[in-house]
Amino acid sequence: MQTALSEAMASLTSHRETVLSETLAEEFTSDANRFQRFHVILDDLLFDFSKQRIDNRTIALLASLAKAADVEAKRDAMFRGEIVNTTERRAALHTALRDTSGECILVDGRNVARDISAERSRMLAFAADVRDGRRPGALGQPITDIVNIGIGGSDLGPAMATRALSPYIPSHLHAHFVSNVDGSDIADILRALDPARTLFIISSKTFTTQETMTNAASARDWIVGALGVKAVPDHFAAVSTRLDKVAEFGIELERTFVFWDWVGGRYSIWSSIGLPLAIAIGPSHFEEFLRGAHDVDQHFHQSVIHKNIPMLMGLISIWNRNFLGYASQAIIPYDQRLSRFPAYLQQLNMESNGKSVDLDGERVSVATGPIVWGEPGTNGQHAFFQLLHQGTEIAPIDFLLAAMPTHADRHHHDLLAANCLAQGEALMRGRSSGEAKKIAAALGTSNAEASRLAPHKTFSGSRPSSTFLYAQLNPRTLGRLIALYEHRVFVEAAIWNINPFDQWGVELGKELASRLAPIVADPNSDLSALDSSTAGLIAHIRKLRS
């Protein structure tokens, strides 16, 4: 397999200059069917990758690379529940969380489909009770504010999805998310809330995460201070695997929901971690969200490579990263409600594929995970698009656009869509020096002035982008979009031969923070064992505090 992989990589390296010998604008001019050949449709969702720096041979060579890397076999192993998270010796079965078919899914000989179904039913019943006022607070008043306390995957997923699907939240409910250990995060949220009407959801697999438990303790103190200690059970729920620690906190078993060690945090929105989303949008819409992801699971599992959207996403990302040398990836949703989607994908991709050793513990020989970033359009156009159009760094872009708005003005949406399409065209087409001079001349600018300004108004073009176009942003669409990117990450990891399901890189900083916390808190603690920079900074903190 290694020989085939090396040959596939070499073929793509040789092919690079052929692709770059023509501009994207020239490719579109010479091929009237380019869009027809380079897009795939899944129901109402269209994936257009015709503005990438590719041709027919690129796709064929990338498909050969996927075959050489055994991506399809690795995909099938993941769906079967085999141990694909090798460093932690676990399956990675987030796909099972959204499979409502009832088919047997075995992990260590146990049919986890039954466990998933039972826990989902419990979670959704609780969500419906809170949403409809059947789970009031200690004073008998209905819950109006849900505060989710978590961090990383226990925060980004629910926070992103709840914002994205805000039109489905009834007016009497408000969802809030606390993640940062910075006390201002929780203080600013609690300031406007009524304790008697507030429910806290503490989301932590181990119930020991420093940031989450620090915020949880503050929330508990707030409830106890306002309503007394007996009110705690009526104002808290938990999502965790540590039932003993949850009980010590004062949260009842019937208000505690579990998920499993074969669910990674950044893949956990489909589990009970989605409780705040289920309360906000309701059980039926949450199930539509799951169905959307399952649609993509089936598509990814069954479609041939050149018609498989996540496969193509991952392969094109490999092409951009390893053969064209593009170090970052921008995510630009033309939808303000998807404002947290780039941050969500940032964690999904960078925590998964930000690895420098392969599955065998050897140093990787190629660049891995790109830097993922982005903001919604049109705001980004007035911030960083200058660099995207004329900067020295090229960043491939994914545009996301709905054909129809969800509870928004149609005129606004037409302008939004026009801006999205225009940016994709401008990045592809560019503008030559001659065109810049002609435009200046048409405006009455002198030849000398037009020539002086032409270099500043020239755009190179050939800057790659893909576009996802779908009917409307609804729960099923959002489920599809998330699952597409999850599987894209898997495809990348399969080719790089790295583990996308662990995250050891976050451990060292956490360990050092635990060691430094008592030193920072105690103004008399000894600093002599610390490096000079850390010691100097703590000394200056003490000086400022004094």
Image (tube, helix red, strand yellow):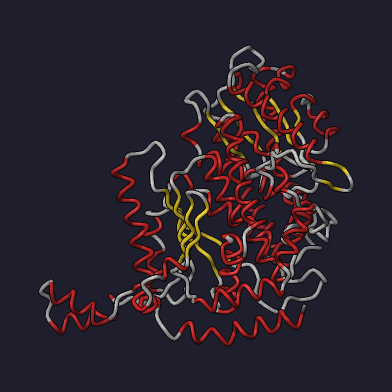
Quadrant of the drawing holding the N terminus? bottom right
Q: In which quarter of the image is residue 371?
A: bottom right
Q: Residue furthest right?
A: 109
The correct choice, above or below, for 313 with respect to 67 in the image is above
Q: Nearer the viewer, residue 534 or 493?
A: 493
Residue at (48%, 82%) from the top-left corner? 19
Position of residue 128 measured from the top left corner of the image (x, y, whole percent) = 62, 24
Locate residue 121 relative to residue 175 in the image: left or right.
right
Q: Which of 465 and 458 is in front in this view?
A: 465
Position of residue 45 measured from the top left corner of the image (x, y, whole percent) = 49, 52
Number of callouts: 0
* Residue 214 shows in the view: no
Q: Quadrant of residue 455?
A: bottom left
* Residue 28 shows in the view: yes
Locate residue 228 relative to residue 46 in the image: left or right.
right
Locate residue 518 relative to residue 537 in the image: left or right.
right
Q: In which quarter of the image is residue 188?
A: top right
Position of residue 103 measured from the top left corner of the image (x, y, whole percent) = 76, 41
Residue at (79%, 58%) from the top-left corner? 85
Q: Residue furthest left?
A: 444
Position of residue 511 measured from the top left corner of the image (x, y, whole percent) = 79, 55
Q: Which residue lies furthest to the top in this view?
A: 140
Q: Nearer the viewer, residue 126 or 508?
A: 126
The correct choice, above or below, for 298 with respect to 231 in the image is below
The correct choice, above or below, for 137 with respect to 542 in the image is above
